[in-house]
Amino acid sequence: MEKRSGEKNGNSANTTCESHSKDASPTVDQESSKNSESEAVCNGKPEDGKTQEENHALSSQKVVSDDVVSKEEEEEEEAYEDEEDDEEDDEEDDDEDDEEDDDDEDEAMPHSSGHEEPGSDSGTTACVAIVKGNEVIVANIGDSRCVLSRDGEAVDLSVDHKPEDEEELQRIEEAGGKVTQDGRVNGGLNLSRAFGDHCYKTNEDLPPEKQMICAFPDLQRTTLTAKDEFMVIACDGIWNAMTSQEVIDFVKERLDEGGKDNLSGICEELFDICLAPDTQGDGTGCDNMTCIIVVFSHDQIDPRGKRKAETEEAAGVPESKRPKL
């Protein structure tokens, strides 16, 4: 009876520590074994040898550790999302910049055809000099230039047409165009008069001479004298690299050294001086270059500034005996 009672009490001790402490008896090995199990449970020590408090502490540490890991993962995820947002913002900014560049290009080419059209997307300047008797007449459009050497001094026989000039700027704006800070019409041409470039001449309410880019020349007349040695006609590829006086000095020095028979060679030397060594600079010396040197014969001009051919013609001298101009 005691044995059964002990078994009962031992079994009850698996669920209630108080019942085990009052009724259990250690007189039998079986009861002792069961009582040991009951004591382990009542003392909070399961089979792994750790108390409930220790297991609870470990569990709490694990929970805290899991919380830390979870928090770190959240922070990493937030940082990744922020990085993605920054990349998206950068892409949007790049897209906006590209759109602005496209707008600038559209302004630079008003026709916006998407492909080059000769005469519409391209053009040319012009500088024409006519010598008649003792007079030289120069007509120019754009920024090509004619310069006379008068006793070694540079005399401009034409005026460059640039968009920022008051007269040119007024015409461009009245035609609906604008001049950018770098001196270009609608961000494109850096001159204001030219043949071709028809995409700048599309205002149907204005005559040709009032368009943003027009082809109407300025005329300048100059009387030649015995002091006038030569003149140079060249495009802006030369004048962007050298001043009028520098070019006159360069040519005169070589003419004085006997270069009159090699004017083409002097032009080539001039190109070599103006040509940029590479394309890393501001563009000076990278433009196309054209040059003409015209040397005057002093014996063809009489002391009155008249060409001898004219006076001899008036005097009835046969053409075969007149000096060639």
Image: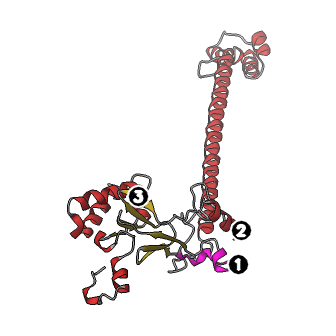
Question: From which residue to which does the magenta span run?
Answer: 195-210
Task: Please tell me how crowded label 1 is: few (under 14), some (14-19), or many (20+) other residues with Cα within 10 Å.
Answer: few
Left or right? Give the position of 220 relative to 295. Answer: right
Question: Seen from this angle, which residue lies furthest front?
Answer: 315
Inspect the image, locate mark 2, and give the three-letter code of the amino acid beneath it.
Answer: Glu
The three-letter amino acid code for the residue at tag 3 is: Ala
Give the mark nearer the N terminus: 1 vs 3.
3
Instruction: Please say if the residues under marks 1 and 2 sit with CB atoms less than 8 Å apart.
Output: yes
From the viewer's side, name the closer residue of 34 and 266: 266
> Label 2 to label 3, Cα distance in Å?
35 Å
Residue at which label 2 appears = 174
User: Which residue is at the front of the view, 197 or 226?
Assistant: 226
Give the structural element (helix, strand or loop) at label 1: loop
Mark found first going from the N terminus, 1 or 2: 2
In the drawing, does residue 111 fall left or right of residue 140?
right
Q: Earlier in the sequence, mark 2 or mark 3?
A: 3
Q: In the image, is residue 97 above or below residue 224?
A: above
Which amino acid lies under the numbered mark 1 shown in the image of this protein?
Leu
Residue tagged by mark 1? 206
Q: Residue at x 62, y 17 (%)?
A: 33
Rendered location of residue 153, percent (x, y): 39, 56
CA gap, disc 1 and disc 2: 10 Å
Q: Is residue 74 visible?
A: yes
Residue on which the image places disc 3: 154
Graded by Cα atoms within 10 Å as few (under 14), some (14 to 19) or many (20 or more), the crowding at tag 3 reads: some
42 or 284: nearer the viewer = 284
Residue 241 can be seen in this image: no
